[in-house]
């Protein structure tokens, strides 16, 4: 009778242990690989271009600032954001307010109610963009060159705009000089800076008869007898004129929006939400009467009121006022 042979699969505890160890390692390796691939492919997340109001850039060299500039041109903002997008996320994480490097370019993206801060620097032969207390991204030399070019051009334009020409206008008899001087770099509108100050100087002894803070623009209009100077100034959204008595520095206010609107009918009343008033002295009728042009947005917001009045300084009286309301305010 033939013998029956039984075969048994023999499995040692060592093979089971190896399988239990290798499988988790393979899973972990797979997960890490996927993580690395997805992380390395992730670019810097930037705000939508339309929400960026301006970009502030500042070059730091040996821990010292070489100058700060503000970029508000829409095309330049779009170019900078496009360049900044050429990045790839690294595994490193920022733990500082500022980079530890002594040389870097600070980039601040200004958008409503907040800002995004970035730092561009070189470490060894590699370029990085760091977001404080967030991720660090790797970029390239082309990005570095492009961003520094944007900064350099803006810095040159900044130097040109801040170097405002001093405005000097002598009185007809040469006794006085009206002056607009300097640039106030603490205030800006669309990259332009106001004069640092306005003054009237008595030329016989160099004394300052009158002075005031500056505006974005200024014009001086002397009366023929050199006693008065009409000063026309403009801020961002309005302009006004006033008179200074050069002999004593007293300021004579001219009829303003409230005074003129009181003379106009209902349809020519100013829009309280968007005034945009501009009052500009344009000519001396005689030594004590000034002619002023004006314009402002009408009540319905779609039309502009413009006109001219003549004002007698001595008698404090509006002698003439003509106005029209027309077209779209734009």
Image: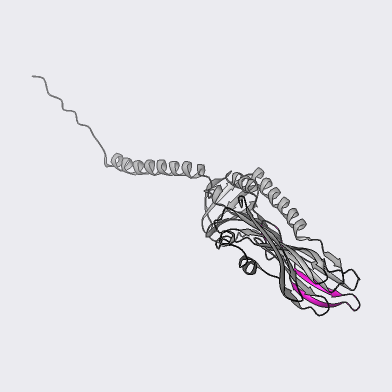
Give the residue furthest to the left. 1
Which x, y percent locates residue 31? 40, 43
Report the front residue among 224 and 179: 224
- Work out which quarter of the rendered image holds the N terminus and state it: top left
Q: Is residue 106 visible?
A: no
Q: x and y percent of residue 154 in the render?
A: 71, 53
135 horizontally vs 190: left or right: left
Toward the viewer: 310 or 90? 310
**Residue 87 at x, y = what percent?**
57, 45
Residue in view at x 59 percent, y 47 percent: 81
Relative image position of residue 46 (x, y in whole percent): 54, 49
- Residue lying farthest bottom? 248
* Picture quadrant of residue 276: bottom right
Q: Is residue 172 magenta?
A: no
Please tell me in which quadrant of the rendered image residue 261 appears.
bottom right
Name the foreground residue: 57 vs 261.
261
Q: Indicate how the structure is coloured in the image.
A: one colour
**Residue at x 15% of width, y 25% of height:** 5
Q: Is residue 32 above or below residue 306?
A: above
Which segment is the magenta one? 187-212
Whether residue 154 is visible here, answered yes or no, is: yes
Up the image or down, 261 lies above or below 142; here it is below
Magenta-drawn stretch contains 197: yes
Q: Nearer the viewer, residue 45 or 156?
A: 156
Looking at the image, residue 20 sits to the left or right of residue 118; the answer is: left
């Amino acid at each position: 009778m033939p013998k029956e042979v039984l075969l048994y699969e023999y499995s040692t505890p060592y093979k089971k242990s190896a399988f239990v160890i290798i499988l988790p390692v393979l899973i972990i390796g797979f997960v890490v690989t996927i993580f690395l691939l997805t992380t390395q492919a992730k670019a810097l997340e930037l705000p939508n271009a339309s929400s960026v109001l301006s970009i502030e850039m500042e070059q730091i060299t040996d821990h010292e600032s070489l100058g700060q500039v503000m970029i508000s041109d829409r095309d330049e903002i779009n170019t900078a954001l496009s360049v900044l997008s050429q990045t790839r996320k690294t595994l490193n994480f920022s733990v500082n307010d500022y980079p530890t490097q002594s040389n870097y370019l600070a980039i601040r993206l200004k958008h409503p109610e907040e800002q995004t801060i970035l730092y561009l620097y070189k470490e060894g032969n590699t370029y990085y963009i760091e977001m404080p207390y967030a991720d660090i991204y790797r970029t390239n030399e082309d990005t570095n060159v492009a961003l520094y070019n944007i900064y350099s051009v803006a810095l040159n334009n900044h130097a040109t705009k801040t170097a405002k020409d001093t405005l000097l206008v002598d009185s007809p008899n040469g006794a006085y000089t009206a002056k607009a001087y300097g640039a106030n770099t603490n205030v800006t509108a669309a990259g332009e800076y106001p004069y640092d100050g306005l003054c009237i100087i008595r030329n016989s002894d160099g004394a300052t008869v009158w002075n005031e803070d500056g505006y974005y623009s200024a014009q001086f209009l002397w009366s023929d007898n050199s006693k008065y100077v009409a000063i026309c100034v403009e801020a961002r959204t309005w302009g006004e004129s006033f008179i200074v008595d050069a002999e004593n520095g007293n300021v004579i206010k001219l009829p303003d929006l409230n005074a003129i609107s009181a003379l106009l009918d209902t349809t020519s009343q100013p829009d309280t939400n968007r005034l945009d008033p501009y009052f500009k002295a344009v000519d001396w009728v005689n030594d004590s009467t000034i002619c002023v042009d004006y314009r402002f947005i009408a009540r319905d917001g779609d039309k502009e009121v413009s006109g001219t009045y003549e004002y007698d300084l001595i008698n404090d009286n509006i002698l003439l006022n003509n106005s029209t309301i027309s077209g779209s305010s734009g």
